[in-house]
Image: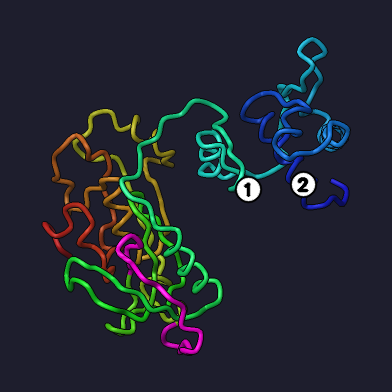
Amino acid sequence: MEEITQAQAERLAHIDFRLYFLGSVGRNDLVKRFGIKEAAATRDLAQYRESAPNNIEYDTKAKLYKVTESFRPLFAYQPERVLAALSKGIGDDTVSDQKPFIPCETPSQLSNPDLDVLSILTRAIYNKQAAQIEYRSLSSGFTTREIIPFYLVDNGLRWHVRAYDRRRDHFTDFVITRITQPKLLPDSPVREHELSSADIQWNRIVELEIIPHPRLGFKETIETDYGMVDGVLALNIRAAVAGYLLRRWNVDCTAKGTLEGAEYHLWLKNRQALYGVENLVLAPGFQQDPL
C-alpha cells in the first residue's frame, strides 16, 4: 500500500472492517463515520479497491460495495476489539454517539470506575508518577496510601490498578471503585524498587495447560469451544493475574479434578506451574489441595 496519512488509514480500515464483518460498505458510511465529503469517500473507496482489488466489488443495483468470496483482510484484527465494535459501536473516537453495528446483548457491569478517579490513575501511569489515594479494603478498612501505579487490569468483573504500595512496601492490586480522592505527587520521586521491573509476580510468566474436565463425557465439545490443540489449551500469563483467570473461567485446580458442578468444564493439568503464585486464593479448589 502506498504512503498514506493516519486519517486515510483509519478510513481504509473502516472500509475493510465493514466488508469483513458486515459484507458491504457505501460512501454514506464513511461520510457519517468521519464527517467527510462524498467526493473524499469516493476517493477512499477507489484507493481501497486499488490496494485490494480482489476484496471488493460494486453492486450497481444496491449502489454499494460488497465483499467478494476471495476477500482477505488488509488489517489485523483482535477479537476483543471486533466484538466491542460490533456490540457497542466503539471506535477510536469516544465523543460521538455511535450505535452497535449488529444486535448484541452483553451482561451489564455491576460497577464502573469513576472517570475522575480513573483519569488521575492513568495520568500517574503515563507520567510514571506517584499518587496519594484514599482506599477502602476488606482487610484494613479505610486508609490513606501512597502508590506507584503502572498497569490497569480487567479481571472480567471489575477493574484494578497494579501498583507499588508504599504503606505495605509491596506490589499489589487496588480495586479502582474502592479508590477516592486521588491526587498526583509529582514531587515524590519514584525509586527503583518501586518500578514495575521490580515486581516479581508481574514479570513472572506462568505456563498453564488447561484441558477438559475429567468428569465430562464429550470432551471434544470443550476442546472446540476453546480452540484446544491436541486436547490442551496452553496459556502464558502473568503470575499476578493467574488467579483472576482461573476463577473467571471456573478452572478446577484440585489435584485430580474433583470439583463437582455444571460450571466446571475445565481442569488445570499442570497445577505445579502455580508454585509461588500469590493470588491462588482465587483459584477454584486450590485451597482444597494445596501444593
Question: From the viewer's perspective, is residue 257 above or below residue 67?
Answer: below
SS class of the residue under badge 1? loop
Q: Is residue 180 magenta?
A: yes
* Pick the front one: 202 or 61: 61
User: How many numbered circles are shown?
Assistant: 2
Question: From the viewer's perspective, is residue 29 above or below residue 240?
Answer: above
Q: Position of residue 248 (x, y in %)?
A: 30, 48
- Give the farthest residue toward the top: 61
Q: Position of residue 63 (x, y in %)?
A: 79, 16
Dividing the picture into quadrants, the one containing residue 225 is top left
Dividing the picture into quadrants, the one containing residue 70 is top right
The earlier-in-sequence mark between 2 and 1 is 2
The crowding category of the residue bearing disc 1, from other C-alpha atoms within 10 Å (few below 14, some 14 to 19, many at least 20), is: few
Q: Nearer the viewer, mark 2 or mark 1?
A: 1
| Residue at image point 40% right, 55% down | 154
Which residue range is magenta in the image? Answer: 173-194
C-alpha span from label 2 to label 1? 15 Å
Question: From the viewer's perspective, is residue 174 above or below residue 59?
Answer: below
- Give the residue number, with chain letter if any, for mark 2: 9
Question: From the viewer's perspective, is residue 164 above or below residue 286?
Answer: below
Q: Position of residue 260 (x, y in %)?
A: 13, 40
- Give the residue number, with chain letter if any, for mark 1: 93
| Residue at image point 77% right, 49% down | 7
| Residue at image point 57% right, 29% down | 101
Q: Quadrant of the C terminus?
A: bottom left
Q: Residue type at mark 2: give it.
A: Ala
Q: Residue type at mark 1: give it.
A: Asp
| Residue at image point 16% right, 70% down | 139
The crowding category of the residue bearing disc 2, from other C-alpha atoms within 10 Å (few below 14, some 14 to 19, many at least 20), is: some
